[in-house]
Image (spheres, grey):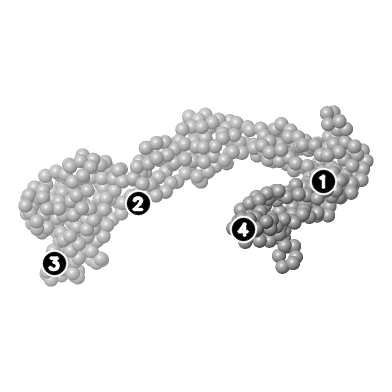
Amino acid sequence: MNLYLSGGATNADPELSLGGPMSTVPASVVGIVSPLFGSLNDAERASGTTIYRCVYVVPTVAVSGLKFYVLSDTPLATTEIFLGWGSADEPVIASETTAPNGVSFESARTPATASSSGNFAAGQRRAMWIKLVVQPGSAKVTEQFGLSYVSDENVPISLTAPTISGSMEDGSTLTALTGTWLNQPTGFNYEWQESASGLSSWTNLGTESTFITSTAQVGKYIRVRIIPVNLHGVGEPAFSPVYGPVVTSDPVNMVLPVINGSPIKGQVLTVTEGVWSGNPTTFLYSWSMSANSVDWAPTGDTTSSLPLTLAHVGSQIRASVTGQRDTVSGAAAITLPTAIVADTAPPVPVNTALPTVSGGIGADFLLTSTTGTWANSPTSYTYQWQSFVGGIWTNISGATASTYVVEDDQTNTQKRVLVAGVNGSGSGVATASAALNFFTITNYGALVALGMI
Protein backbone atom coordinates (compact mmCIF):
# COMPACT_ATOMS: atom_id res chain seq x y z
CA MET A 1 0.00 0.00 0.00
CA ASN A 2 1.65 3.25 -1.17
CA LEU A 3 0.85 6.92 -0.63
CA TYR A 4 2.04 9.60 -3.09
CA LEU A 5 2.05 13.40 -2.90
CA SER A 6 -0.19 15.45 -5.18
CA GLY A 7 0.73 18.74 -6.85
CA GLY A 8 2.22 17.47 -10.12
CA ALA A 9 4.41 14.63 -11.32
CA THR A 10 7.64 16.21 -10.03
CA ASN A 11 6.36 17.77 -6.81
CA ALA A 12 8.46 16.82 -3.80
CA ASP A 13 7.20 19.55 -1.44
CA PRO A 14 4.50 18.30 1.01
CA GLU A 15 3.30 21.87 1.54
CA LEU A 16 2.39 22.01 -2.16
CA SER A 17 0.51 18.70 -1.97
CA LEU A 18 -2.84 20.47 -2.41
CA GLY A 19 -4.48 18.32 -5.09
CA GLY A 20 -3.86 18.09 -8.83
CA PRO A 21 -1.91 15.35 -10.64
CA MET A 22 -0.22 12.61 -8.61
CA SER A 23 3.48 13.01 -7.92
CA THR A 24 6.03 10.27 -8.42
CA VAL A 25 7.36 11.12 -4.95
CA PRO A 26 6.01 8.81 -2.21
CA ALA A 27 4.41 10.42 0.80
CA SER A 28 4.86 7.12 2.65
CA VAL A 29 4.45 3.42 2.55
CA VAL A 30 1.66 3.17 5.10
CA GLY A 31 3.09 4.21 8.41
CA ILE A 32 4.54 7.64 9.22
CA VAL A 33 3.54 10.41 6.81
CA SER A 34 6.41 12.86 7.20
CA PRO A 35 6.18 15.81 7.09
CA LEU A 36 2.92 16.83 5.41
CA PHE A 37 2.39 19.85 7.63
CA GLY A 38 5.09 22.45 8.23
CA SER A 39 5.53 24.27 11.50
CA LEU A 40 2.92 26.91 12.25
CA ASN A 41 3.96 30.49 12.91
CA ASP A 42 3.04 32.32 16.11
CA ALA A 43 0.04 34.06 14.56
CA GLU A 44 -1.42 30.78 13.25
CA ARG A 45 -1.04 29.08 16.62
CA ALA A 46 -2.49 32.02 18.44
CA SER A 47 -5.58 32.38 16.26
CA GLY A 48 -6.02 28.72 15.25
CA THR A 49 -6.27 27.44 11.71
CA THR A 50 -7.38 24.53 9.51
CA ILE A 51 -4.93 23.17 6.93
CA TYR A 52 -5.49 20.60 4.14
CA ARG A 53 -3.20 18.20 2.29
CA CYS A 54 -3.96 15.76 -0.52
CA VAL A 55 -2.21 12.44 -1.08
CA TYR A 56 -3.04 9.59 -3.45
CA VAL A 57 -3.60 6.06 -2.21
CA VAL A 58 -2.33 3.36 -4.59
CA PRO A 59 -2.69 -0.28 -3.46
CA THR A 60 -0.12 -2.69 -4.87
CA VAL A 61 -2.74 -5.46 -5.01
CA ALA A 62 -6.50 -5.49 -5.44
CA VAL A 63 -8.30 -4.86 -2.13
CA SER A 64 -11.90 -4.55 -1.07
CA GLY A 65 -13.40 -2.63 1.82
CA LEU A 66 -10.28 -0.45 2.24
CA LYS A 67 -10.44 1.84 5.28
CA PHE A 68 -7.84 4.23 6.70
CA TYR A 69 -7.49 5.58 10.19
CA VAL A 70 -5.06 7.82 12.09
CA LEU A 71 -2.56 5.65 13.88
CA SER A 72 -0.74 8.49 15.68
CA ASP A 73 -1.65 12.14 15.88
CA THR A 74 0.15 15.20 17.14
CA PRO A 75 0.18 14.72 20.92
CA LEU A 76 -1.45 18.07 21.64
CA ALA A 77 -5.03 18.17 22.88
CA THR A 78 -5.58 21.35 20.85
CA THR A 79 -5.07 19.70 17.47
CA GLU A 80 -6.84 16.95 15.58
CA ILE A 81 -6.52 15.20 12.21
CA PHE A 82 -9.46 14.18 10.02
CA LEU A 83 -9.60 12.04 6.87
CA GLY A 84 -11.76 12.37 3.75
CA TRP A 85 -11.88 10.85 0.27
CA GLY A 86 -11.76 12.52 -3.14
CA SER A 87 -11.50 11.29 -6.72
CA ALA A 88 -8.81 9.67 -8.85
CA ASP A 89 -7.78 13.13 -10.14
CA GLU A 90 -8.47 15.73 -7.50
CA PRO A 91 -8.49 19.42 -8.46
CA VAL A 92 -6.02 21.78 -6.83
CA ILE A 93 -7.35 23.92 -3.96
CA ALA A 94 -6.59 27.64 -3.88
CA SER A 95 -4.54 27.47 -0.69
CA GLU A 96 -3.74 25.11 2.13
CA THR A 97 -6.61 26.59 4.17
CA THR A 98 -9.20 26.12 1.40
CA ALA A 99 -11.54 23.17 1.94
CA PRO A 100 -11.78 20.79 -1.04
CA ASN A 101 -15.20 20.62 -2.70
CA GLY A 102 -17.42 17.59 -2.07
CA VAL A 103 -15.18 15.94 0.51
CA SER A 104 -16.64 14.72 3.81
CA PHE A 105 -14.20 14.35 6.70
CA GLU A 106 -14.28 11.82 9.54
CA SER A 107 -12.48 11.60 12.85
CA ALA A 108 -11.06 8.17 12.02
CA ARG A 109 -9.09 7.14 15.06
CA THR A 110 -9.58 3.37 15.34
CA PRO A 111 -10.23 0.46 12.96
CA ALA A 112 -13.86 0.55 14.07
CA THR A 113 -14.23 4.22 13.05
CA ALA A 114 -11.93 4.04 10.01
CA SER A 115 -12.78 6.13 6.95
CA SER A 116 -13.96 3.83 4.17
CA SER A 117 -12.77 4.17 0.58
CA GLY A 118 -14.35 1.04 -0.88
CA ASN A 119 -12.74 -1.33 -3.37
CA PHE A 120 -9.53 -0.85 -5.34
CA ALA A 121 -8.03 -2.67 -8.29
CA ALA A 122 -4.27 -3.19 -8.19
CA GLY A 123 -2.59 0.12 -9.09
CA GLN A 124 -5.86 2.11 -8.96
CA ARG A 125 -5.51 5.47 -7.24
CA ARG A 126 -7.78 7.68 -5.23
CA ALA A 127 -7.20 10.96 -3.43
CA MET A 128 -7.25 11.06 0.36
CA TRP A 129 -7.50 14.46 2.00
CA ILE A 130 -6.01 15.07 5.44
CA LYS A 131 -7.39 17.97 7.47
CA LEU A 132 -5.38 19.36 10.40
CA VAL A 133 -7.44 21.47 12.82
CA VAL A 134 -5.42 23.67 15.20
CA GLN A 135 -7.33 25.28 18.04
CA PRO A 136 -6.42 28.86 19.09
CA GLY A 137 -3.50 29.04 21.50
CA SER A 138 -1.91 25.77 20.37
CA ALA A 139 1.74 25.07 21.08
CA LYS A 140 4.13 23.75 18.41
CA VAL A 141 2.40 21.25 16.12
CA THR A 142 4.14 17.95 15.41
CA GLU A 143 4.84 17.65 11.69
CA GLN A 144 4.49 13.86 11.59
CA PHE A 145 1.53 11.57 12.04
CA GLY A 146 0.82 7.96 11.26
CA LEU A 147 -1.80 6.17 9.18
CA SER A 148 -2.87 2.57 9.13
CA TYR A 149 -5.54 0.70 7.25
CA VAL A 150 -7.82 -2.28 7.36
CA SER A 151 -9.53 -4.12 4.53
CA ASP A 152 -11.41 -7.27 3.82
CA GLU A 153 -8.05 -8.71 2.77
CA ASN A 154 -6.48 -7.92 6.14
CA VAL A 155 -8.97 -9.70 8.38
CA PRO A 156 -8.92 -13.52 8.21
CA ILE A 157 -10.68 -15.08 5.21
CA SER A 158 -11.76 -18.72 5.22
CA LEU A 159 -10.15 -20.98 2.60
CA THR A 160 -11.45 -24.37 3.72
CA ALA A 161 -14.43 -24.93 5.97
CA PRO A 162 -14.07 -25.97 9.61
CA THR A 163 -14.79 -29.59 10.42
CA ILE A 164 -15.73 -31.59 13.51
CA SER A 165 -13.90 -34.67 14.74
CA GLY A 166 -15.45 -37.18 17.10
CA SER A 167 -18.32 -39.63 17.12
CA MET A 168 -21.88 -38.34 16.77
CA GLU A 169 -23.02 -40.34 19.79
CA ASP A 170 -24.22 -39.09 23.14
CA GLY A 171 -21.41 -38.81 25.65
CA SER A 172 -18.78 -38.24 22.94
CA THR A 173 -16.25 -35.41 22.92
CA LEU A 174 -16.42 -33.39 19.70
CA THR A 175 -13.47 -31.23 18.64
CA ALA A 176 -13.69 -28.23 16.31
CA LEU A 177 -11.01 -28.17 13.59
CA THR A 178 -10.72 -24.58 12.40
CA GLY A 179 -10.00 -25.19 8.71
CA THR A 180 -7.52 -22.98 6.85
CA TRP A 181 -7.49 -19.19 6.64
CA LEU A 182 -5.78 -16.32 4.86
CA ASN A 183 -4.20 -13.42 6.75
CA GLN A 184 -2.87 -15.28 9.76
CA PRO A 185 -5.62 -15.47 12.38
CA THR A 186 -4.28 -14.91 15.89
CA GLY A 187 -7.22 -16.63 17.53
CA PHE A 188 -10.67 -18.12 17.10
CA ASN A 189 -14.00 -17.93 18.87
CA TYR A 190 -16.27 -20.96 18.79
CA GLU A 191 -20.03 -21.41 18.76
CA TRP A 192 -21.38 -24.95 18.91
CA GLN A 193 -24.95 -25.14 17.63
CA GLU A 194 -27.74 -27.73 17.45
CA SER A 195 -30.86 -28.02 15.34
CA ALA A 196 -33.72 -30.50 15.33
CA SER A 197 -33.88 -30.44 11.51
CA GLY A 198 -30.31 -29.61 10.57
CA LEU A 199 -31.69 -26.88 8.31
CA SER A 200 -32.85 -24.02 10.53
CA SER A 201 -33.56 -22.87 14.09
CA TRP A 202 -29.99 -23.31 15.31
CA THR A 203 -29.39 -22.75 19.02
CA ASN A 204 -26.06 -22.25 20.74
CA LEU A 205 -24.59 -24.98 22.94
CA GLY A 206 -21.09 -23.88 23.99
CA THR A 207 -18.13 -21.64 23.24
CA GLU A 208 -15.10 -23.87 23.77
CA SER A 209 -13.07 -25.67 21.12
CA THR A 210 -14.60 -28.96 22.30
CA PHE A 211 -18.12 -30.01 23.20
CA ILE A 212 -19.35 -33.15 24.98
CA THR A 213 -22.69 -34.40 23.72
CA SER A 214 -25.37 -35.70 26.08
CA THR A 215 -28.75 -37.35 25.83
CA ALA A 216 -30.16 -33.85 25.23
CA GLN A 217 -28.53 -33.88 21.77
CA VAL A 218 -29.84 -37.33 20.73
CA GLY A 219 -31.76 -36.97 17.45
CA LYS A 220 -30.38 -33.49 16.77
CA TYR A 221 -27.84 -32.17 14.30
CA ILE A 222 -24.60 -30.41 15.23
CA ARG A 223 -22.42 -27.78 13.58
CA VAL A 224 -19.75 -25.37 14.77
CA ARG A 225 -19.33 -21.70 13.84
CA ILE A 226 -15.75 -20.39 13.82
CA ILE A 227 -15.11 -16.65 14.21
CA PRO A 228 -11.50 -15.67 13.36
CA VAL A 229 -9.64 -12.64 14.68
CA ASN A 230 -6.28 -11.04 13.97
CA LEU A 231 -4.63 -7.67 14.53
CA HIS A 232 -6.84 -6.08 11.86
CA GLY A 233 -10.13 -7.17 13.29
CA VAL A 234 -12.76 -9.90 13.17
CA GLY A 235 -13.26 -11.91 9.99
CA GLU A 236 -16.45 -13.35 8.60
CA PRO A 237 -17.51 -16.52 10.46
CA ALA A 238 -17.19 -19.89 8.77
CA PHE A 239 -19.49 -22.86 9.44
CA SER A 240 -18.64 -26.51 9.49
CA PRO A 241 -20.79 -28.95 7.56
CA VAL A 242 -23.83 -30.24 9.44
CA TYR A 243 -23.19 -33.47 11.33
CA GLY A 244 -25.62 -35.93 12.81
CA PRO A 245 -28.10 -36.75 13.97
CA VAL A 246 -26.58 -37.66 17.32
CA VAL A 247 -27.43 -41.24 18.23
CA THR A 248 -27.52 -43.17 21.46
CA SER A 249 -24.35 -45.25 21.83
CA ASP A 250 -24.38 -48.58 23.61
CA PRO A 251 -21.56 -49.05 26.14
CA VAL A 252 -18.93 -51.37 24.65
CA ASN A 253 -16.27 -53.16 26.65
CA MET A 254 -12.74 -52.38 25.46
CA VAL A 255 -10.64 -54.08 28.17
CA LEU A 256 -11.96 -57.07 30.10
CA PRO A 257 -12.61 -56.80 33.83
CA VAL A 258 -10.19 -58.68 36.12
CA ILE A 259 -10.79 -60.74 39.28
CA ASN A 260 -8.51 -59.93 42.21
CA GLY A 261 -7.99 -62.04 45.30
CA SER A 262 -6.98 -65.61 46.22
CA PRO A 263 -9.33 -68.50 45.29
CA ILE A 264 -9.34 -69.95 48.80
CA LYS A 265 -12.32 -70.58 51.06
CA GLY A 266 -12.75 -67.64 53.44
CA GLN A 267 -11.15 -65.13 51.04
CA VAL A 268 -13.04 -62.41 49.14
CA LEU A 269 -12.75 -61.99 45.38
CA THR A 270 -13.34 -58.58 43.78
CA VAL A 271 -13.78 -57.68 40.13
CA THR A 272 -12.81 -54.48 38.30
CA GLU A 273 -15.13 -52.66 35.90
CA GLY A 274 -12.81 -53.03 32.93
CA VAL A 275 -12.60 -50.26 30.33
CA TRP A 276 -15.68 -49.20 28.32
CA SER A 277 -16.60 -46.82 25.54
CA GLY A 278 -20.03 -45.22 25.46
CA ASN A 279 -19.58 -43.62 28.89
CA PRO A 280 -21.49 -46.07 31.10
CA THR A 281 -22.60 -44.53 34.38
CA THR A 282 -23.39 -47.75 36.29
CA PHE A 283 -22.28 -51.38 36.16
CA LEU A 284 -24.16 -54.62 36.73
CA TYR A 285 -22.34 -57.63 38.21
CA SER A 286 -22.98 -61.35 38.35
CA TRP A 287 -20.80 -64.28 39.40
CA SER A 288 -20.81 -67.89 38.22
CA MET A 289 -18.97 -71.10 39.08
CA SER A 290 -18.03 -74.29 37.26
CA ALA A 291 -16.60 -77.63 38.32
CA ASN A 292 -15.61 -78.61 34.75
CA SER A 293 -14.80 -75.23 33.07
CA VAL A 294 -17.73 -75.81 30.66
CA ASP A 295 -21.00 -75.63 32.54
CA TRP A 296 -21.32 -72.35 34.45
CA ALA A 297 -23.97 -71.84 37.13
CA PRO A 298 -24.79 -68.43 38.66
CA THR A 299 -23.87 -67.98 42.31
CA GLY A 300 -26.62 -65.39 42.87
CA ASP A 301 -24.14 -62.67 43.87
CA THR A 302 -24.69 -59.28 42.15
CA THR A 303 -22.06 -56.96 43.60
CA SER A 304 -18.43 -56.40 42.68
CA SER A 305 -17.23 -58.76 45.43
CA LEU A 306 -17.72 -62.46 46.20
CA PRO A 307 -16.92 -64.03 49.61
CA LEU A 308 -15.74 -67.59 48.99
CA THR A 309 -17.50 -70.33 51.00
CA LEU A 310 -17.45 -74.11 51.19
CA ALA A 311 -19.97 -74.15 48.30
CA HIS A 312 -17.28 -72.73 45.97
CA VAL A 313 -14.55 -75.21 46.88
CA GLY A 314 -13.56 -77.37 43.91
CA SER A 315 -14.95 -74.92 41.34
CA GLN A 316 -13.55 -72.14 39.22
CA ILE A 317 -15.07 -68.68 39.50
CA ARG A 318 -15.71 -66.02 36.90
CA ALA A 319 -17.56 -62.68 36.89
CA SER A 320 -19.72 -60.89 34.34
CA VAL A 321 -19.76 -57.05 34.17
CA THR A 322 -22.27 -55.03 32.13
CA GLY A 323 -21.85 -51.30 31.46
CA GLN A 324 -25.08 -49.31 31.58
CA ARG A 325 -25.93 -45.69 30.80
CA ASP A 326 -29.43 -44.52 31.60
CA THR A 327 -31.54 -47.43 30.30
CA VAL A 328 -29.06 -48.54 27.66
CA SER A 329 -26.89 -51.57 28.43
CA GLY A 330 -23.93 -52.93 26.53
CA ALA A 331 -23.01 -56.57 26.06
CA ALA A 332 -21.66 -58.25 29.18
CA ALA A 333 -17.88 -58.63 29.56
CA ILE A 334 -16.76 -61.88 31.21
CA THR A 335 -13.52 -62.28 33.13
CA LEU A 336 -11.06 -65.13 32.77
CA PRO A 337 -11.81 -67.88 35.30
CA THR A 338 -9.87 -68.21 38.53
CA ALA A 339 -7.95 -71.27 39.60
CA ILE A 340 -9.99 -73.95 41.39
CA VAL A 341 -11.11 -72.69 44.79
CA ALA A 342 -9.19 -74.51 47.53
CA ASP A 343 -10.60 -75.55 50.90
CA THR A 344 -7.52 -74.34 52.72
CA ALA A 345 -4.56 -72.29 51.72
CA PRO A 346 -1.79 -74.46 50.24
CA PRO A 347 1.69 -74.26 51.73
CA VAL A 348 3.95 -71.61 50.28
CA PRO A 349 6.18 -72.84 47.45
CA VAL A 350 9.27 -74.83 48.43
CA ASN A 351 12.32 -75.09 46.17
CA THR A 352 13.36 -78.59 45.15
CA ALA A 353 15.99 -77.74 42.50
CA LEU A 354 18.16 -74.60 42.34
CA PRO A 355 17.68 -72.02 39.61
CA THR A 356 20.47 -71.85 37.03
CA VAL A 357 21.97 -68.96 35.06
CA SER A 358 23.13 -69.01 31.45
CA GLY A 359 24.85 -66.33 29.38
CA GLY A 360 28.20 -64.57 28.84
CA ILE A 361 30.74 -63.57 31.47
CA GLY A 362 31.85 -60.06 30.44
CA ALA A 363 30.39 -56.56 30.16
CA ASP A 364 27.22 -56.17 28.04
CA PHE A 365 26.46 -59.90 28.19
CA LEU A 366 22.86 -61.00 28.82
CA LEU A 367 22.28 -63.39 31.72
CA THR A 368 19.12 -65.50 31.89
CA SER A 369 17.80 -67.29 34.96
CA THR A 370 15.59 -70.36 35.15
CA THR A 371 13.04 -70.62 37.96
CA GLY A 372 14.38 -73.86 39.32
CA THR A 373 11.86 -76.43 40.50
CA TRP A 374 9.25 -75.72 43.21
CA ALA A 375 6.64 -77.68 45.09
CA ASN A 376 3.17 -76.38 46.06
CA SER A 377 2.25 -74.93 42.66
CA PRO A 378 3.71 -71.43 42.47
CA THR A 379 1.74 -69.13 40.19
CA SER A 380 4.53 -66.58 39.73
CA TYR A 381 8.17 -65.93 40.59
CA THR A 382 10.29 -63.05 41.86
CA TYR A 383 13.91 -62.38 40.92
CA GLN A 384 16.75 -60.39 42.46
CA TRP A 385 20.25 -60.28 40.93
CA GLN A 386 23.20 -59.80 43.29
CA SER A 387 26.92 -58.98 43.20
CA PHE A 388 29.50 -60.19 45.71
CA VAL A 389 31.02 -56.91 46.92
CA GLY A 390 33.21 -56.45 50.01
CA GLY A 391 32.64 -59.96 51.21
CA ILE A 392 28.82 -59.77 51.14
CA TRP A 393 26.12 -60.40 48.57
CA THR A 394 24.52 -57.06 47.60
CA ASN A 395 21.33 -56.53 45.61
CA ILE A 396 21.80 -54.87 42.21
CA SER A 397 19.36 -51.95 42.06
CA GLY A 398 16.56 -52.46 39.55
CA ALA A 399 17.72 -55.95 38.55
CA THR A 400 14.47 -57.78 39.34
CA ALA A 401 13.66 -59.54 36.08
CA SER A 402 14.53 -63.04 34.91
CA THR A 403 17.27 -61.52 32.73
CA TYR A 404 20.10 -59.12 33.51
CA VAL A 405 22.68 -57.33 31.32
CA VAL A 406 26.09 -57.07 33.02
CA GLU A 407 27.30 -53.45 33.11
CA ASP A 408 30.90 -52.24 32.84
CA ASP A 409 31.16 -51.40 36.54
CA GLN A 410 29.78 -54.84 37.45
CA THR A 411 32.61 -56.85 35.90
CA ASN A 412 35.34 -58.57 37.95
CA THR A 413 32.75 -59.56 40.55
CA GLN A 414 30.71 -62.68 41.21
CA LYS A 415 27.03 -62.72 40.28
CA ARG A 416 24.04 -64.80 41.32
CA VAL A 417 20.26 -64.57 41.26
CA LEU A 418 17.69 -65.15 44.01
CA VAL A 419 14.42 -66.74 42.84
CA ALA A 420 11.28 -67.17 44.94
CA GLY A 421 8.11 -69.02 44.00
CA VAL A 422 4.81 -67.31 44.88
CA ASN A 423 1.29 -68.73 45.27
CA GLY A 424 -1.94 -67.68 46.95
CA SER A 425 -0.45 -68.35 50.38
CA GLY A 426 2.55 -66.14 49.86
CA SER A 427 6.17 -66.30 48.78
CA GLY A 428 8.54 -69.18 49.33
CA VAL A 429 12.07 -68.69 50.61
CA ALA A 430 14.22 -67.02 47.94
CA THR A 431 16.76 -69.54 46.65
CA ALA A 432 20.14 -68.56 45.18
CA SER A 433 21.67 -69.87 41.99
CA ALA A 434 25.30 -70.92 41.92
CA ALA A 435 27.72 -67.98 41.85
CA LEU A 436 29.31 -66.99 38.52
CA ASN A 437 32.68 -65.25 38.10
CA PHE A 438 32.81 -62.16 35.86
CA PHE A 439 35.78 -60.47 34.24
CA THR A 440 36.35 -57.67 31.78
CA ILE A 441 36.59 -58.79 28.18
CA THR A 442 40.34 -57.94 28.12
CA ASN A 443 41.11 -59.89 31.28
CA TYR A 444 38.98 -62.81 30.16
CA GLY A 445 41.12 -63.50 27.09
CA ALA A 446 44.31 -63.43 29.16
CA LEU A 447 42.87 -65.68 31.83
CA VAL A 448 41.78 -68.24 29.25
CA ALA A 449 45.29 -68.24 27.71
CA LEU A 450 46.80 -68.91 31.14
CA GLY A 451 44.41 -71.73 31.76
CA MET A 452 43.02 -70.00 34.85
CA ILE A 453 39.42 -70.24 33.70
Lower position in the chain sequence, tag 2 or tag 1: 2
Figure quadrant of residue 440: bottom right
**Crowding near pointer 4: few (<14 within 10 Å), some, many (20+)?**
few
Lower position in the chain sequence, tag 3 or tag 1: 3
**Crowding near pointer 3: few (<14 within 10 Å), some, many (20+)?**
some
Residue drawn at x 51%, y 32% as measured from the top left: 243
Query: Dot 2 lies on which element?
Result: loop
Query: Dot 4 lies on which element?
Result: helix
Residue 231's disc number: 2
Nearer the observer: mark 2 or 1; the answer is 1
**Crowding near pointer 1: few (<14 within 10 Å), some, many (20+)?**
some
Residue type of the residue flagged with mark 2: Leu
Residue corresponding to mark 3: 40
Residue type of the residue flagged with mark 3: Leu
Image coordinates for residue 73, horizontal then vertical, percent: 24, 61
Lower position in the chain sequence, tag 4 or tag 2: 2
How far is disc 3 from disc 1 in space, using C-alphas? 107 Å
Nearer the observer: mark 3 or 1; the answer is 1
Residue type of the residue flagged with mark 1: Thr
Residue 373's disc number: 1
Residue corresponding to mark 4: 446
